[in-house]
Image (cartoon, rainbow, N blue to C red):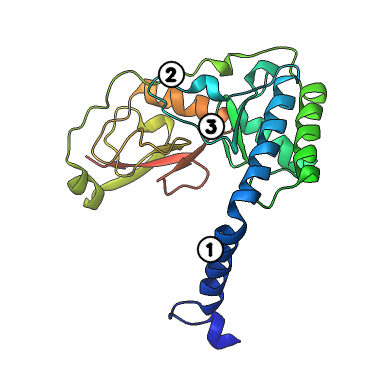
Amino acid sequence: MLSLLQSSSPSSILLASLDEARMQMATEGRARLTITLALAQKARDAIRKTDGLWCYGDELIGVTGIFAIDPSKLIIRVNDIGLSGFKASEILRNEYKVDVEFADLRQIICSLTIADTESTTDLLIDALNHLSKHHRQTHHTDFMLIKLPNGLPRSVINVRDAYFTTKTRRVSLNEGVGHVLVESIIPYPPGVPLLVPGEIMEQHHLDFLRYFLDKGGYLVGMADPNFRTVSIVDS
């Protein structure tokens, strides 16, 4: 058994699992996906009837370059009940044992697969109903207003030189304003860098980062896992 699990060779267990999945989709895939898509539509219709929630669908096709959608993905807008997607995701996980695939400032995404059934779909619908009824915020804050930084950052050193420089200093996030960064700051989602090595962090970047973190967002690329400090070029 150890030779199967502790080896740098291709995993026999993984390959067998992939082959089984391939066989299942080849022989039962159309029937199973038909059921999955029907369950997704059932959930979408139910969510649209839930006060304060909305689940996007075919109305997106043709809007802002969208050619098609994956109907098994339920894109659910939650900000109308006063919650960010991050907060809704946290509540669903902790109180209803529902893990969403993705969350941002406004939405969550739930995915249905061929493993889902009527009971798991009903569990999701019930959890979202409870979310709307019992976690609605009566006082909406400004978190629905996505505050994006203005323009592109100022780059004063090329990325390679900034990343490999030995002249670095770690300062608080507030103190990083006006300095050249040595590390990337990448809000997730969407996972697109806000700042990369060699660019200057300005006040509007800090404002956005504070806003994003306050609403439950996550940053990648930073050495400090608590996002309190940042590495800068020590001039």
Identity, as a three-letter code, of the amino acid under mark 1: Arg
**Label annotation for residue 172:** none
**Residue plotted at (51% across, 28% down):** 212
Residue 83 in the image: x percent, y percent? 66, 23
Identity, as a three-letter code, of the amino acid under mark 2: Val
132 versus 14 height, above or below:
above
**Label annotation for residue 63:** 2
Contact check, label 3 and label 1, Cβ < 8 Å = no
Residue 77 image-quadrant placement:
top right
Judging from the image, what secondary structure is the residue with disc 2 in?
loop
Quarter that holds the N terminus: bottom right
Q: Could you say which is closer to the camera, residue 25 or residue 130?
A: 25
Quarter that holds the C terminus: top left
Spatial distance from mark 3 to mark 2, Cα to Cα?
30 Å
Residue 222 image-quadrant placement:
top left
Identity, as a three-letter code, of the amino acid under mark 3: Leu
| Position of residue 50 in the picture relative to residue 192 (left or right) | right
Q: Indicate which label's residue lies in the foreground, 3 or 2.
A: 2
Q: Indicate which label's residue lies in the foreground, 1 or 2.
A: 1
Judging from the image, what secondary structure is the residue with disc 3 in?
helix
**Label annotation for residue 22:** 1
Q: Indicate which label's residue lies in the foreground, 3 or 1.
A: 1
Judging from the image, what secondary structure is the residue with disc 1 in?
helix
88 versus 148 height, above or below:
below
Residue at numbered disc 3:
213
| Position of residue 138 in the picture relative to residue 223 (left or right) | right
